[in-house]
Amino acid sequence: MKKVLAIILCVLLITAMFAGCGEKTPDTPDTPAGTDETKTVKVGLVCIGDENDQGYTYNFIRGKEAATEALAAKGINVEWLVKWNIGEDSSCEDANIELAEAGCQLIINNSFGFEDYMLKVAPEYPDIQFIACTNQASWGDDLPNTHNAFANIYEGRYLAGVVAGMKLNQMIEEGEITEDEAVIGYVGAFSFAEVISGMTAYYLGARSVCPSATMKVQFTGSWSDATEEANAASALIDAGCVLLSQHADNSTPATTAQSKGAFFTSYNNDMISVAPEAVLVGTRIDWGVYFEEIIEAVANGTEIPQDWSKGIADGAVVLTALNEAIAAPGTAEKLEEVEAGLKDGTIKVFDTSTFTVGGEPLTQAFALDTDGDFNPDSEEAVVDGEFKESYYQSAPYFAIQIDGIEWLNAAFG
Protein backbone atom coordinates (compact mmCIF):
# COMPACT_ATOMS: atom_id res chain seq x y z
CA MET A 1 0.00 0.00 0.00
CA LYS A 2 2.82 2.36 0.92
CA LYS A 3 4.45 1.59 -2.42
CA VAL A 4 1.23 2.53 -4.29
CA LEU A 5 0.89 5.80 -2.33
CA ALA A 6 4.49 6.69 -3.16
CA ILE A 7 3.85 6.15 -6.86
CA ILE A 8 0.71 8.32 -6.74
CA LEU A 9 2.59 11.13 -4.97
CA CYS A 10 5.37 11.01 -7.60
CA VAL A 11 2.84 11.24 -10.41
CA LEU A 12 1.13 14.22 -8.75
CA LEU A 13 4.47 15.96 -8.22
CA ILE A 14 5.55 15.49 -11.84
CA THR A 15 2.15 16.72 -13.09
CA ALA A 16 2.45 19.85 -10.93
CA MET A 17 5.94 20.52 -12.24
CA PHE A 18 4.83 20.36 -15.89
CA ALA A 19 1.79 22.49 -15.14
CA GLY A 20 4.04 25.11 -13.57
CA CYS A 21 6.11 25.36 -16.73
CA GLY A 22 3.17 26.95 -18.58
CA GLU A 23 2.49 29.66 -16.01
CA LYS A 24 3.71 33.27 -16.50
CA THR A 25 6.05 34.65 -13.87
CA PRO A 26 5.71 38.31 -12.84
CA ASP A 27 8.66 39.12 -15.16
CA THR A 28 7.04 37.67 -18.30
CA PRO A 29 5.34 40.32 -20.49
CA ASP A 30 1.71 39.75 -21.31
CA THR A 31 1.73 39.83 -25.14
CA PRO A 32 -1.69 39.73 -26.80
CA ALA A 33 -2.30 36.77 -29.09
CA GLY A 34 -1.61 37.58 -32.75
CA THR A 35 0.63 40.59 -32.05
CA ASP A 36 3.56 40.85 -34.49
CA GLU A 37 7.04 41.23 -33.16
CA THR A 38 8.68 44.65 -33.43
CA LYS A 39 10.33 45.22 -36.81
CA THR A 40 13.59 47.13 -37.28
CA VAL A 41 14.55 49.03 -40.43
CA LYS A 42 18.07 50.32 -40.97
CA VAL A 43 17.99 53.70 -42.73
CA GLY A 44 20.86 55.78 -44.09
CA LEU A 45 20.62 59.56 -44.45
CA VAL A 46 23.11 61.59 -46.49
CA CYS A 47 23.04 65.30 -45.55
CA ILE A 48 24.60 68.35 -47.16
CA GLY A 49 24.86 70.06 -43.76
CA ASP A 50 24.12 69.37 -40.13
CA GLU A 51 21.75 70.59 -37.44
CA ASN A 52 23.82 73.73 -36.91
CA ASP A 53 22.48 75.34 -40.09
CA GLN A 54 19.13 75.77 -38.28
CA GLY A 55 17.57 75.53 -41.70
CA TYR A 56 17.62 72.91 -44.43
CA THR A 57 19.37 69.95 -42.82
CA TYR A 58 17.89 70.80 -39.43
CA ASN A 59 14.46 70.39 -41.02
CA PHE A 60 15.38 66.89 -42.21
CA ILE A 61 16.44 66.03 -38.67
CA ARG A 62 13.02 67.11 -37.44
CA GLY A 63 11.42 64.85 -40.05
CA LYS A 64 13.67 61.97 -39.00
CA GLU A 65 12.71 62.37 -35.35
CA ALA A 66 8.98 62.73 -36.07
CA ALA A 67 8.95 59.62 -38.27
CA THR A 68 10.89 57.59 -35.70
CA GLU A 69 8.36 58.45 -33.01
CA ALA A 70 5.34 57.75 -35.23
CA LEU A 71 6.75 54.42 -36.40
CA ALA A 72 7.58 53.29 -32.87
CA ALA A 73 3.88 53.54 -32.07
CA LYS A 74 3.29 51.12 -34.97
CA GLY A 75 5.85 48.61 -33.71
CA ILE A 76 8.60 49.65 -36.13
CA ASN A 77 12.03 50.62 -34.82
CA VAL A 78 14.33 52.71 -37.00
CA GLU A 79 18.11 52.44 -36.82
CA TRP A 80 19.54 55.58 -38.43
CA LEU A 81 23.02 55.98 -39.88
CA VAL A 82 23.66 59.60 -40.84
CA LYS A 83 26.42 61.11 -42.97
CA TRP A 84 26.83 64.81 -42.17
CA ASN A 85 28.29 67.70 -44.24
CA ILE A 86 28.64 65.73 -47.47
CA GLY A 87 29.58 67.67 -50.60
CA GLU A 88 27.79 67.49 -53.94
CA ASP A 89 30.75 65.56 -55.33
CA SER A 90 32.33 62.09 -55.20
CA SER A 91 32.13 62.15 -51.40
CA CYS A 92 28.38 61.66 -51.84
CA GLU A 93 29.02 58.54 -53.90
CA ASP A 94 31.33 57.27 -51.16
CA ALA A 95 28.72 58.01 -48.49
CA ASN A 96 26.07 56.00 -50.34
CA ILE A 97 28.45 53.05 -50.74
CA GLU A 98 29.40 53.12 -47.07
CA LEU A 99 25.76 53.14 -45.99
CA ALA A 100 24.92 50.32 -48.39
CA GLU A 101 27.82 48.23 -47.11
CA ALA A 102 26.72 48.95 -43.53
CA GLY A 103 23.47 47.12 -44.23
CA CYS A 104 21.02 49.98 -44.74
CA GLN A 105 17.78 48.86 -46.38
CA LEU A 106 16.85 52.41 -47.37
CA ILE A 107 19.19 55.34 -48.16
CA ILE A 108 17.87 58.91 -48.33
CA ASN A 109 19.85 61.69 -50.04
CA ASN A 110 18.74 65.14 -48.95
CA SER A 111 20.28 67.55 -51.49
CA PHE A 112 19.53 68.27 -55.15
CA GLY A 113 23.14 67.77 -56.25
CA PHE A 114 23.37 64.31 -54.67
CA GLU A 115 21.23 62.49 -57.20
CA ASP A 116 23.85 61.94 -59.91
CA TYR A 117 26.20 60.31 -57.40
CA MET A 118 23.41 58.25 -55.86
CA LEU A 119 22.50 56.93 -59.31
CA LYS A 120 26.04 55.63 -59.77
CA VAL A 121 25.66 53.49 -56.66
CA ALA A 122 22.05 52.29 -56.86
CA PRO A 123 22.51 49.75 -59.71
CA GLU A 124 25.12 47.90 -57.65
CA TYR A 125 22.67 47.38 -54.76
CA PRO A 126 19.32 46.39 -56.32
CA ASP A 127 17.87 45.23 -52.98
CA ILE A 128 18.37 48.64 -51.34
CA GLN A 129 15.91 51.48 -51.92
CA PHE A 130 17.53 54.86 -52.78
CA ILE A 131 15.70 58.18 -52.36
CA ALA A 132 16.67 61.49 -54.01
CA CYS A 133 14.87 64.33 -52.23
CA THR A 134 13.97 67.47 -54.22
CA ASN A 135 15.11 65.86 -57.46
CA GLN A 136 13.70 64.55 -60.73
CA ALA A 137 15.80 61.94 -62.55
CA SER A 138 14.96 58.82 -60.54
CA TRP A 139 11.27 58.76 -61.38
CA GLY A 140 12.01 58.47 -65.08
CA ASP A 141 14.94 56.06 -65.05
CA ASP A 142 14.79 52.29 -65.49
CA LEU A 143 15.94 51.47 -61.96
CA PRO A 144 13.14 50.07 -59.78
CA ASN A 145 15.05 50.88 -56.57
CA THR A 146 15.41 54.65 -57.11
CA HIS A 147 12.78 57.20 -56.16
CA ASN A 148 12.14 60.95 -56.08
CA ALA A 149 10.35 62.96 -53.43
CA PHE A 150 9.41 66.60 -52.96
CA ALA A 151 6.44 68.45 -51.52
CA ASN A 152 4.20 71.23 -52.79
CA ILE A 153 6.21 73.82 -50.89
CA TYR A 154 4.96 76.49 -53.27
CA GLU A 155 1.72 76.38 -51.26
CA GLY A 156 3.61 77.25 -48.08
CA ARG A 157 5.58 79.92 -49.92
CA TYR A 158 2.34 81.50 -51.08
CA LEU A 159 1.03 81.60 -47.51
CA ALA A 160 4.27 83.12 -46.21
CA GLY A 161 3.97 85.69 -48.97
CA VAL A 162 0.51 86.62 -47.71
CA VAL A 163 2.05 87.31 -44.29
CA ALA A 164 4.68 89.48 -45.98
CA GLY A 165 2.05 91.38 -47.97
CA MET A 166 0.02 92.04 -44.85
CA LYS A 167 3.12 93.51 -43.18
CA LEU A 168 3.87 95.69 -46.20
CA ASN A 169 0.30 97.01 -46.08
CA GLN A 170 0.72 97.88 -42.40
CA MET A 171 3.96 99.72 -43.13
CA ILE A 172 2.25 101.67 -45.93
CA GLU A 173 -0.76 102.53 -43.77
CA GLU A 174 1.44 103.72 -40.91
CA GLY A 175 3.54 105.90 -43.22
CA GLU A 176 6.79 103.96 -42.81
CA ILE A 177 7.01 103.37 -46.57
CA THR A 178 5.14 104.44 -49.68
CA GLU A 179 3.37 102.01 -52.00
CA ASP A 180 6.31 102.20 -54.40
CA GLU A 181 8.68 101.28 -51.58
CA ALA A 182 6.95 97.97 -50.87
CA VAL A 183 9.97 96.07 -52.15
CA ILE A 184 10.72 92.48 -51.13
CA GLY A 185 14.19 90.97 -51.28
CA TYR A 186 14.76 87.28 -51.91
CA VAL A 187 17.97 85.35 -51.29
CA GLY A 188 18.01 82.44 -53.74
CA ALA A 189 20.50 79.63 -54.22
CA PHE A 190 20.31 79.01 -57.99
CA SER A 191 18.27 80.45 -60.84
CA PHE A 192 16.47 77.29 -61.82
CA ALA A 193 13.02 75.83 -61.35
CA GLU A 194 13.04 74.78 -57.70
CA VAL A 195 14.02 78.27 -56.54
CA ILE A 196 12.08 80.18 -59.20
CA SER A 197 8.88 78.28 -58.42
CA GLY A 198 9.13 79.04 -54.72
CA MET A 199 10.05 82.70 -55.04
CA THR A 200 7.31 83.30 -57.62
CA ALA A 201 4.70 81.67 -55.40
CA TYR A 202 5.91 83.81 -52.52
CA TYR A 203 5.65 86.98 -54.57
CA LEU A 204 2.18 86.09 -55.83
CA GLY A 205 1.05 85.52 -52.25
CA ALA A 206 2.40 88.92 -51.19
CA ARG A 207 0.85 90.70 -54.16
CA SER A 208 -2.53 89.06 -53.57
CA VAL A 209 -2.90 91.37 -50.56
CA CYS A 210 -0.43 94.17 -51.46
CA PRO A 211 -0.81 94.89 -55.21
CA SER A 212 2.04 97.43 -55.34
CA ALA A 213 4.64 94.96 -54.08
CA THR A 214 7.70 94.24 -56.22
CA MET A 215 10.62 91.90 -55.61
CA LYS A 216 14.39 91.79 -56.17
CA VAL A 217 16.31 88.50 -56.16
CA GLN A 218 19.97 87.89 -55.41
CA PHE A 219 21.33 84.40 -56.17
CA THR A 220 24.28 83.01 -54.23
CA GLY A 221 25.30 80.11 -56.49
CA SER A 222 25.27 77.69 -53.55
CA TRP A 223 22.67 75.82 -51.54
CA SER A 224 24.60 76.33 -48.34
CA ASP A 225 27.01 79.23 -47.85
CA ALA A 226 26.22 81.14 -44.68
CA THR A 227 28.52 84.06 -45.51
CA GLU A 228 27.28 84.56 -49.07
CA GLU A 229 23.67 84.32 -47.90
CA ALA A 230 24.32 87.08 -45.37
CA ASN A 231 26.05 89.19 -48.04
CA ALA A 232 23.12 88.74 -50.42
CA ALA A 233 20.64 89.76 -47.73
CA SER A 234 22.69 92.83 -46.91
CA ALA A 235 22.93 93.84 -50.57
CA LEU A 236 19.17 93.49 -51.02
CA ILE A 237 18.44 95.71 -48.03
CA ASP A 238 20.92 98.28 -49.33
CA ALA A 239 19.01 98.13 -52.65
CA GLY A 240 15.83 99.26 -50.88
CA CYS A 241 14.21 95.97 -49.82
CA VAL A 242 12.27 96.36 -46.57
CA LEU A 243 11.29 92.70 -46.15
CA LEU A 244 13.23 89.58 -47.10
CA SER A 245 12.79 85.85 -47.59
CA GLN A 246 15.08 83.07 -48.75
CA HIS A 247 15.63 79.79 -50.52
CA ALA A 248 19.02 78.92 -49.07
CA ASP A 249 20.05 76.67 -46.22
CA ASN A 250 21.20 78.91 -43.37
CA SER A 251 19.76 81.40 -40.90
CA THR A 252 22.19 84.23 -41.70
CA PRO A 253 19.74 86.10 -43.96
CA ALA A 254 17.36 86.31 -40.99
CA THR A 255 19.98 87.64 -38.59
CA THR A 256 21.20 90.08 -41.24
CA ALA A 257 17.65 91.35 -41.75
CA GLN A 258 17.27 91.97 -38.02
CA SER A 259 20.63 93.74 -37.78
CA LYS A 260 19.64 96.10 -40.61
CA GLY A 261 16.04 96.76 -39.53
CA ALA A 262 14.20 94.70 -42.16
CA PHE A 263 11.47 92.10 -41.66
CA PHE A 264 11.84 88.48 -42.72
CA THR A 265 9.98 85.25 -43.48
CA SER A 266 12.00 82.06 -43.16
CA TYR A 267 12.30 78.66 -44.81
CA ASN A 268 12.80 75.22 -43.20
CA ASN A 269 12.65 76.61 -39.65
CA ASP A 270 10.77 79.42 -37.93
CA MET A 271 14.04 81.25 -37.01
CA ILE A 272 12.20 83.44 -34.52
CA SER A 273 14.69 82.37 -31.88
CA VAL A 274 17.62 83.82 -33.85
CA ALA A 275 15.87 86.98 -35.10
CA PRO A 276 12.76 87.69 -32.98
CA GLU A 277 12.47 91.32 -34.12
CA ALA A 278 12.53 90.41 -37.81
CA VAL A 279 10.99 86.99 -38.43
CA LEU A 280 7.24 87.07 -39.09
CA VAL A 281 6.63 83.42 -39.98
CA GLY A 282 8.24 80.54 -41.84
CA THR A 283 7.25 77.61 -44.00
CA ARG A 284 8.77 74.17 -44.27
CA ILE A 285 8.30 70.69 -45.67
CA ASP A 286 7.40 68.18 -42.98
CA TRP A 287 9.62 65.33 -44.17
CA GLY A 288 8.31 63.18 -41.33
CA VAL A 289 5.18 62.48 -43.40
CA TYR A 290 7.23 60.99 -46.24
CA PHE A 291 9.80 59.24 -44.07
CA GLU A 292 7.08 57.50 -42.10
CA GLU A 293 5.42 56.31 -45.31
CA ILE A 294 8.53 54.90 -46.98
CA ILE A 295 10.07 53.31 -43.89
CA GLU A 296 6.78 51.59 -43.11
CA ALA A 297 6.71 50.32 -46.71
CA VAL A 298 10.18 48.82 -46.33
CA ALA A 299 9.23 47.24 -43.00
CA ASN A 300 6.14 45.64 -44.54
CA GLY A 301 7.66 44.75 -47.90
CA THR A 302 5.38 47.01 -49.93
CA GLU A 303 6.28 49.33 -52.82
CA ILE A 304 7.56 52.89 -52.44
CA PRO A 305 6.08 55.43 -54.90
CA GLN A 306 8.47 56.19 -57.75
CA ASP A 307 7.69 59.91 -57.53
CA TRP A 308 6.07 61.41 -54.41
CA SER A 309 4.67 64.86 -53.66
CA LYS A 310 2.04 66.03 -51.20
CA GLY A 311 1.08 69.42 -49.81
CA ILE A 312 -0.78 71.39 -47.19
CA ALA A 313 -3.89 69.22 -47.32
CA ASP A 314 -1.79 66.17 -46.37
CA GLY A 315 0.30 67.88 -43.68
CA ALA A 316 3.45 67.62 -45.81
CA VAL A 317 3.75 71.43 -46.03
CA VAL A 318 3.28 73.53 -42.91
CA LEU A 319 3.67 77.06 -41.63
CA THR A 320 5.74 77.72 -38.55
CA ALA A 321 4.36 79.80 -35.70
CA LEU A 322 3.21 83.32 -36.54
CA ASN A 323 5.16 85.96 -34.64
CA GLU A 324 2.14 87.80 -33.27
CA ALA A 325 4.39 90.42 -31.64
CA ILE A 326 5.34 91.92 -35.02
CA ALA A 327 2.88 90.48 -37.57
CA ALA A 328 0.30 92.87 -38.99
CA PRO A 329 -3.13 92.90 -37.31
CA GLY A 330 -5.54 90.45 -38.92
CA THR A 331 -2.79 88.23 -40.34
CA ALA A 332 -3.86 85.08 -38.51
CA GLU A 333 -7.42 85.40 -39.78
CA LYS A 334 -6.24 86.04 -43.33
CA LEU A 335 -3.98 82.99 -43.20
CA GLU A 336 -6.86 80.81 -42.09
CA GLU A 337 -8.94 82.03 -45.03
CA VAL A 338 -6.20 81.53 -47.64
CA GLU A 339 -5.14 78.13 -46.31
CA ALA A 340 -8.73 76.92 -46.55
CA GLY A 341 -8.83 78.13 -50.17
CA LEU A 342 -5.65 76.28 -51.02
CA LYS A 343 -6.97 73.09 -49.47
CA ASP A 344 -10.34 73.16 -51.24
CA GLY A 345 -8.85 74.32 -54.55
CA THR A 346 -10.62 77.67 -54.79
CA ILE A 347 -7.23 79.42 -54.65
CA LYS A 348 -4.68 78.44 -57.30
CA VAL A 349 -1.13 79.55 -56.57
CA PHE A 350 -0.16 79.91 -60.25
CA ASP A 351 -3.46 81.31 -61.51
CA THR A 352 -2.37 82.81 -64.84
CA SER A 353 -4.82 85.71 -64.47
CA THR A 354 -2.74 87.02 -61.54
CA PHE A 355 0.55 87.65 -63.38
CA THR A 356 2.06 88.50 -66.74
CA VAL A 357 5.26 87.64 -68.57
CA GLY A 358 6.72 90.46 -70.67
CA GLY A 359 3.44 92.30 -70.32
CA GLU A 360 1.41 89.43 -71.71
CA PRO A 361 -0.65 86.72 -70.01
CA LEU A 362 0.87 83.25 -69.91
CA THR A 363 -1.17 81.03 -72.21
CA GLN A 364 1.23 78.18 -72.89
CA ALA A 365 4.15 76.55 -71.07
CA PHE A 366 5.64 73.08 -70.89
CA ALA A 367 6.63 70.87 -68.02
CA LEU A 368 10.32 70.16 -67.58
CA ASP A 369 11.66 66.87 -68.80
CA THR A 370 14.15 64.77 -66.85
CA ASP A 371 17.10 66.67 -68.33
CA GLY A 372 15.87 69.89 -66.73
CA ASP A 373 15.15 71.69 -70.02
CA PHE A 374 11.92 72.96 -71.47
CA ASN A 375 10.76 70.43 -74.01
CA PRO A 376 7.93 71.36 -76.39
CA ASP A 377 7.17 67.65 -76.74
CA SER A 378 6.50 67.34 -73.02
CA GLU A 379 3.22 67.93 -71.23
CA GLU A 380 1.35 71.21 -71.51
CA ALA A 381 1.57 72.84 -68.09
CA VAL A 382 -1.06 75.60 -68.50
CA VAL A 383 -4.50 74.06 -68.17
CA ASP A 384 -7.76 75.96 -67.56
CA GLY A 385 -5.97 79.16 -66.61
CA GLU A 386 -3.55 77.57 -64.15
CA PHE A 387 0.08 76.55 -64.40
CA LYS A 388 -0.08 73.05 -62.94
CA GLU A 389 3.05 72.90 -60.82
CA SER A 390 4.39 69.55 -59.53
CA TYR A 391 1.61 67.74 -61.37
CA TYR A 392 3.59 65.75 -63.93
CA GLN A 393 6.52 65.20 -61.60
CA SER A 394 7.15 66.02 -57.96
CA ALA A 395 10.10 68.33 -58.64
CA PRO A 396 9.02 71.91 -59.50
CA TYR A 397 9.24 72.97 -63.15
CA PHE A 398 7.95 76.56 -63.04
CA ALA A 399 11.05 78.35 -64.39
CA ILE A 400 9.48 81.52 -65.78
CA GLN A 401 10.53 85.06 -64.86
CA ILE A 402 7.28 86.96 -64.35
CA ASP A 403 6.78 90.73 -64.34
CA GLY A 404 7.39 92.44 -61.00
CA ILE A 405 10.39 90.27 -60.07
CA GLU A 406 13.84 91.68 -60.87
CA TRP A 407 16.81 89.31 -60.96
CA LEU A 408 19.93 91.17 -59.83
CA ASN A 409 22.10 88.30 -61.06
CA ALA A 410 21.76 84.70 -62.21
CA ALA A 411 23.37 81.51 -60.95
CA PHE A 412 22.78 78.19 -62.63
CA GLY A 413 23.65 74.96 -60.86
Image: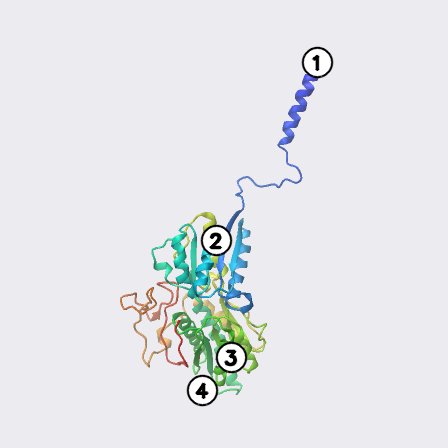
Query: What residue did someone put label 3 on?
Result: 167
Would residue 125 be found to the left or right of residue 258 on screen?
Answer: left
| Mark sitting on residue 180 | 4
Looking at the picture, tell me which residue is in the foreground, 330 or 269. Answer: 269
Query: What residue did someone put label 2 on?
Result: 295
In the image, what residue type sits under mark 1?
Lys
Q: Residues within 10 Å of mark 1 (few under 14, many from 20)?
A: few
Looking at the picture, tell me which residue is in the foreground, 299 or 95. Answer: 95
* Vertical relation: 396 (above or below) 262: above
Q: Which image quadrant is residue 117 in?
A: bottom left
Residue 79 percent location from the top left of the image = 53, 53
Label 1 to label 4, Cα distance in Å? 113 Å
Label 2 to label 3, Cα distance in Å? 41 Å
Q: Secondary structure at mark 2?
A: helix
In the image, what residue type sits under mark 4?
Asp
Label 4 to label 2, Cα distance in Å? 50 Å
Q: Secondary structure at mark 4?
A: helix
Label 3 to label 1, Cα distance in Å? 101 Å
| Mark sitting on residue 325 | none
Marks 4/2 in contact by CB < 8 Å: the verdict is no
Q: Secondary structure at mark 1?
A: helix
Residue 228 percent location from the top left of the image = 49, 77
The quadrant of the picture occupied by the N terminus is top right
**Whether residue 121 can be seen here:** yes
**Dot in front, 3 or 1:** 1
Please tell me which of labels 4 and 2 falls first in the chain. Answer: 4
**Dot in front, 4 or 2:** 2
Q: Residue furthest top?
A: 1
Please tell me which of labels 3 and 4 falls first in the chain. Answer: 3
Query: What residue did someone put label 1 on?
Result: 3
Q: Secondary structure at mark 3?
A: helix
